[in-house]
Amino acid sequence: MLKVGHENAISITKLAYNTCLNSSSKRQSTGAIRARVKEDLGISLTAQDVEKVRKALIKAFPWVVKYFYTGYGLRLMKLERDIALHVIESMHAKGVPCLSMHDSFLVPADFKEELEYAMKYWASHVTGSEAGRNVGFDHFKVK
């Protein structure tokens, strides 16, 4: 039985989850998970170890299994990127400096309301859903 510390277990779980969402096949995800865990954490996993992690993910989040091996995560990242680019362009068009890190933005405090408006507007426009409302994955018409 493979024993890893709590921090490594969290890292392996997150990596496996994202890899299963982003990969196109179970086999591809197994190889990618093993390689990445070895590279990032220095831990050698067997294919059986990866399968145990995968089964634990499916048990904890059974609704997400239909998105495994579909590349769905990559399409969601593209939506996030599109929203971020529009927000940055909107702020720059108003002469407001705007820095971003993933889905977070930094603007001068005086422009907080404009930033919040741009974020909600572009999230709604890009996804076709009202920002701030909980919707299921099926709502997003990603291609």
Image (spheres, helix red, strand yellow):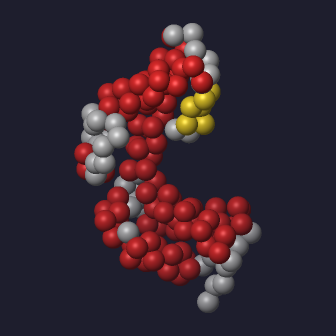
Residue pictured at 37% horizontal, 55% vertical: 70
- Residue 51 seen by the camera: no
Question: As displayed, is residue 82 above or below residue 72?
Answer: above
- Residue 21 x, y percent position in the rendering: 43, 57
Q: Is residue 34 left or right of residue 125?
A: right
The quarter in which the C terminus is drawn is top left
Total number of numbered labels? 0
Q: Residue at x 35, y 58 (%)?
A: 67
Is 35 or 78 nearer to us in this picture?
Answer: 78
Residue furthest right as drawn: 42
User: In the rendered view, would you say 87 is above or below 57?
Assistant: above
Q: Position of residue 27 (x, y in %)?
A: 47, 67
Residue 112 left/right relative to 4: left
Asked whether, in this view, residue 112 is left or right of residue 67, the answer is right
Q: Nearer the viewer, residue 43 or 120?
A: 120
Measured as percent of width and height from the top left, residue 48 is found at: 53, 81
Q: Which residue: 59% across, 68% down?
A: 10
Q: Position of residue 105 (x, y in %)?
A: 56, 31
Name, please, the residue furthest toward the bottom. 1
Kindly identify the residue that appears in the image at 41 percent across and 37 percent down. Answer: 79
Image height check: is 112 above or below 13? above
* Residue 114 seen in render: yes
27 and 125: which is toward the camera: 125
Q: Residue furthest front?
A: 110
